[in-house]
Amino acid sequence: MKNFPKQIPIFPLSGVIYFPKTNLPLNIFEQRYLDLVNDALRKDKLMGMIQSKKNGQEIYKIGCLGKINDYEKSDDGRIIISLTGITRFEVLQEKDNSKLYREFVVNYEKFSNDLNPDTHNINVNDLMLKMKGFFKSKGIFLNWKEFEKLDISQKVNTLAMIAPFSNEEKQKLLESVSLNEKVKTLENITGFYLHEVNFKNLTIQ
C-alpha cells in the first residue's frame, strides 16, 4: 500500500460505484474532469472514484482507486476512458488547490486485503443462486457461462457493481471490508429483494 499516492484526484459521482478488479467506462465531458484525466495521464494514470451525496458537495468516506487503462478522445472534445479498480481507500481530508477538480488525502490500510483477497472458506454457491433469480426477476441478462470463468473476488465485486441496488446499498457493499462480509451483505440485500418479489406475487385465495 505504501506505493500508492497519499493525495489523489477524485471524481465524485452519484450512483456510480466500482470495486477492485472491475472495469468502469467513463465518458468525460466537463472541463474539470477533462483536466483531472489529462493530469492523471501525465502523472501516474491513477485517480479515485467516490459517491457524492444528495446535497451536492458532500461525499461518502470510502471510494476506489483506479488506473486509466484505455483512453480515447472524440472529435467533440470528450474523453472516453476505462478505469481498472485497484484498491479501496478512506478519505481523510480535502486539500485546497487551484485546480477545477478536487483532491483528497486518503488512506488505504483498512482495505489492505484488496490486493490479495482471502478467498479461503468462501462459498458463493448460495449467492449465485440468489443473484440469478434476482437478475431474472429484473429482466437483466448476464452471460453466466462466461461469468463462471472469473475468480471468486471478481465474481463478488462484479455482482456488487452491476446489481440494480440503491446508492446506499451499493455504498454498504463498498464499505464491507472483507470479501466474506461482502458476500453476506450481498446475500442479505438480494434476499430482501427476492422476498419483496415473492410477496408481491402472492394472491389471496
Image (spheres, grey):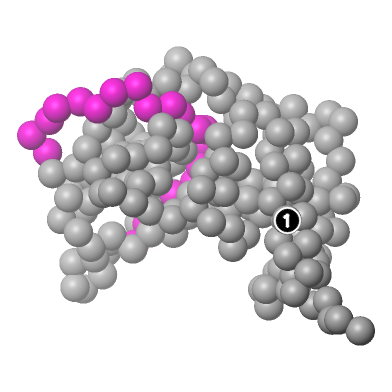
> Is residue 27 depicted above or below 14 in this figure?
below
Residue indicated by mark 1: 192
Q: Main secondary structure of the magenta part?
A: strand
Looking at the image, which residue sits at the far front?
205
Relative image position of residue 93 (x, y in whole percent): 29, 23
Q: Please tell me in which quadrant of the rendered image residue 57 appears.
A: top left
Is 65 on the left or on the right of 7, as rendered?
Answer: right
Residue under the point 17% across and 50% down: 32
> Is residue 38 depicted above or below 116 in this figure?
below
Is residue 94 shown in magenta? yes
Is 133 on the left or on the right of 20, as rendered?
Answer: right
Q: Please tell me in which quadrant of the rendered image residue 2 appears.
A: top left
Looking at the image, which residue sits at the far left?
98
Looking at the image, which residue sits at the far right?
205
Relative image position of residue 137 (x, y in whole percent): 73, 74
Q: Nearer the viewer, residue 114 or 172?
A: 172
Whether residue 174 is visible here, answered yes or no, is: yes
Q: Nearer the viewer, residue 174 or 67?
A: 174
Which segment did they paint magenta?
A: 80-99
Q: Nearer the viewer, residue 76 or 167?
A: 167
Is residue 199 shown in magenta? no
Relative image position of residue 18 (x, y in whole percent): 51, 48
Relative image position of residue 152 (x, y in whole percent): 76, 43
Looking at the image, which residue sits at the far top?
2
Residue under the point 57% across and 49% down: 169
Is 183 on the left or on the right of 126, as rendered?
Answer: left
